[in-house]
C-alpha cells in the first residue's frame, strides 16, 4: 500500500511526464497556429506606440513601447519560421511561452529603470498581456507549460514591484498612473496565480477531450481517422527525406468464433490485453491504431521491411501468450464455456508493407499492400507474418475454433 508521501510523489511525477503521443502531437501542431497569431498580434501592437510617438515624440515611455513591440515582431517572425516545417521541435512551446512572459516583464522593467516606475506597476495595457500569455498556453495541451508560464509571470512581476519601489525615490509621478498601492499590487499577483490555476483546469479538460476524441475507449489505441492522418504525414516525410516506412496490419485469428463461444465481454478483455501487449513492443515514435473490429494497424517510421518483420514476429509471439480469466458468473448461453476457466490461446496473422521496398506511390497503396499480405497470411494457415511472397510461419493454426 502506498503511503501518502509516495502517492504525492507519484502524482507529481505524472504531472511532469506527458507520455501520450496524441497530446504531444496536438501541442506541436497548435504551436504553428500560435506562432502565426502571435506575429499578427504583436504586429498590430506596434501601431499603438507608433501612434503615441506621432502624438508625443518626446516621451520616453513611447520609445520604450516602440522598441519592445518591434523586437517582439522580430522574435515572432523567427518563431514562425522555426515552426514552418512539418515537424516542430518539442522545446519550442516552453521557450516561446517563457519569451512571451519575459518580453512583457522587460517592458515593465524598462519603464522602472528609465524613471517611470508608476507605469511599471500601474500600467493599464502592458500588464494585461500577462493574462494573454497564460491563456494561450491552454492550446498547447501541456499543463507543465501552463504552470511554468503562470509562476514565471508572477515571479517576474514580483521582482518588478520590488525594483520599481526601490528605484522610485522622489521620481514617482502619481498624476497620470496613480500612486503605489501595496494592496493593489498584491491583488495583481493574486490574479496572475488565479489565472494560472484556472488555465490548468482548462488544460486538463482539453487534454481529456482530445484523448477521448482520438482514442478507442476499449483498447486505448488511436482511431482510424487519426491514424490515417498521421500515416499520411509520415509517408510524405519518408519520401521527402528518403527514410523507410513500414505498415503492418494485424488480425486476430478466429476472433468471431471466439466471441461466439466465450461471449463478447471476454472478447473485449482479450482485445484490450492484446492492445497492451502490442503497445509494449513498439517504440515511442510508432503509432498503433484500431482499424476496425479485431484488426489493428501499426505504423513503423524508419524501419525497413526486415526490421519491421522482426518486430512483428515479436508481436505475433506476444499475442499467443495473452491469457484472460473468465468472469466467475456463468454465461446464460447454451454451449458457452464454463465460468472460471481460461480462454484458449489466440493467434494473430500479420501483413507488412514498406516504402520504398514495395514501390508504393501512394499511402493508400501502402496500406492496401499490407492488407493484401494479411489476407494471404490468413488464407495460408494463419498465425504467421507475411512481408513478401514467402510467409514466416508460426506453430500453425489454433484448433478448436471454426473459421
Image: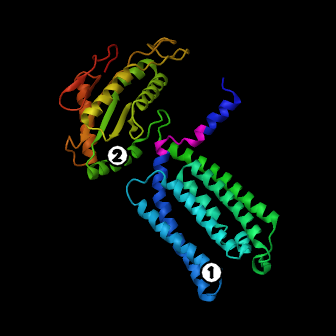
In the picture of the structure, the residue carrying the numbered disc 1 is 62
Q: Which residues are magenta?
A: 13-22
- Quarter of the figure that contains the N terminus: top right
In the picture of the structure, the residue carrying the numbered disc 2 is 231
Magenta span includes 15: yes
Res. 6 image quadrant? top right
Q: Main secondary structure of the magenta part?
A: helix
- Left or right, 300 with respect to 3, comes to left
x and y percent of residue 56 in the render?
64, 87
Instruction: Label 1: state its secondary structure.
Output: helix
x and y percent of residue 55 in the render?
62, 88
Instruction: Answer above or below: position of 110 versus 162.
Output: below
Q: Which mark is residue 23?
A: none
| Numbered-mark total | 2
Magenta span includes 224: no
Query: Which of the pair 147/107 is nearer the observer?
Result: 107
Amino acid at each position: 500500500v502506498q503511503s501518502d508521501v509516495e502517492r504525492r510523489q507519484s502524482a507529481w511525477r505524472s504531472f511532469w511526464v506527458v507520455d501520450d503521443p496524441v497530446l504531444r502531437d496536438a501541442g506541436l501542431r497548435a504551436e504553428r497556429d500560435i506562432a502565426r497569431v502571435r506575429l499578427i498580434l504583436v504586429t498590430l501592437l506596434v501601431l499603438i506606440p507608433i501612434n503615441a510617438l506621432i502624438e508625443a515624440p518626446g516621451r520616453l515611455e513611447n520609445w520604450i513601447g516602440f522598441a519592445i513591440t518591434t523586437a517582439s515582431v522580430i522574435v515572432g517572425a523567427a518563431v514562425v519560421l522555426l515552426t514552418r516545417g512539418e515537424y516542430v521541435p518539442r522545446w519550442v512551446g516552453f521557450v516561446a511561452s517563457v519569451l512571451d512572459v519575459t518580453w512583457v516583464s522587460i517592458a515593465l522593467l524598462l519603464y522602472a529603470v528609465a524613471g517611470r516606475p508608476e507605469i511599471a506597476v500601474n500600467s493599464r495595457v502592458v500588464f494585461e498581456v500577462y493574462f494573454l500569455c497564460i491563456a494561450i498556453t491552454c492550446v498547447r495541451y501541456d499543463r507543465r507549460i501552463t504552470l511554468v508560464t503562470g509562476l514565471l509571470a508572477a515571479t517576474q512581476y514580483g521582482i518588478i514591484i520590488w525594483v520599481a519601489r526601490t528605484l522610485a525615490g522622489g521620481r514617482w509621478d502619481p498624476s497620470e498612473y496613480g500612486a503605489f498601492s501595496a494592496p493593489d499590487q498584491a491583488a495583481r499577483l493574486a490574479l496572475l496565480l488565479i489565472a494560472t490555476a484556472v488555465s490548468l483546469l482548462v488544460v486538463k479538460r482539453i487534454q481529456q477531450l482530445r484523448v477521448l476524441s482520438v482514442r478507442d475507449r476499449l483498447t486505448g489505441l488511436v482511431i482510424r481517422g487519426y491514424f490515417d492522418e498521421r500515416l499520411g504525414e509520415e509517408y510524405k516525410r519518408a519520401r521527402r527525406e528518403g527514410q523507410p516506412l513500414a505498415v503492418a496490419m494485424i488480425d486476430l485469428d478466429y476472433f468471431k468464433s471466439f466471441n461466439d463461444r466465450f461471449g463478447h465481454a471476454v472478447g473485449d478483455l482479450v482485445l484490450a490485453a492484446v492492445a497492451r501487449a502490442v503497445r509494449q513492443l513498439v517504440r515511442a515514435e510508432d503509432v498503433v491504431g484500431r482499424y476496425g473490429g479485431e484488426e489493428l494497424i501499426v505504423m513503423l517510421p524508419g524501419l525497413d521491411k526486415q526490421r519491421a518483420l522482426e518486430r512483428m514476429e515479436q508481436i505475433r509471439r506476444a499475442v499467443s501468450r495473452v491469457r484472460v480469466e473468465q468472469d466467475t458468473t456463468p454465461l446464460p448461453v447454451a454451449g458457452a464455456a464454463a465460468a472460471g476457466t481460461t480462454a484458449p490461446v489466440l493467434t494473430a496473422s500479420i501483413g507488412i508493407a514498406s516504402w520504398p521496398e514495395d514501390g508504393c506511390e501512394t499511402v493508400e497503396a501502402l496500406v492496401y499492400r499490407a492488407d493484401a499480405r494479411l489476407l494471404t497470411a490468413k488464407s495460408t494457415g494463419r498465425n504467421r507474418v507475411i512481408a513478401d511472397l514467402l510467409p514466416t510461419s508460426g506453430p500453425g493454426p489454433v484448433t478448436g475454433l471454426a473459421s
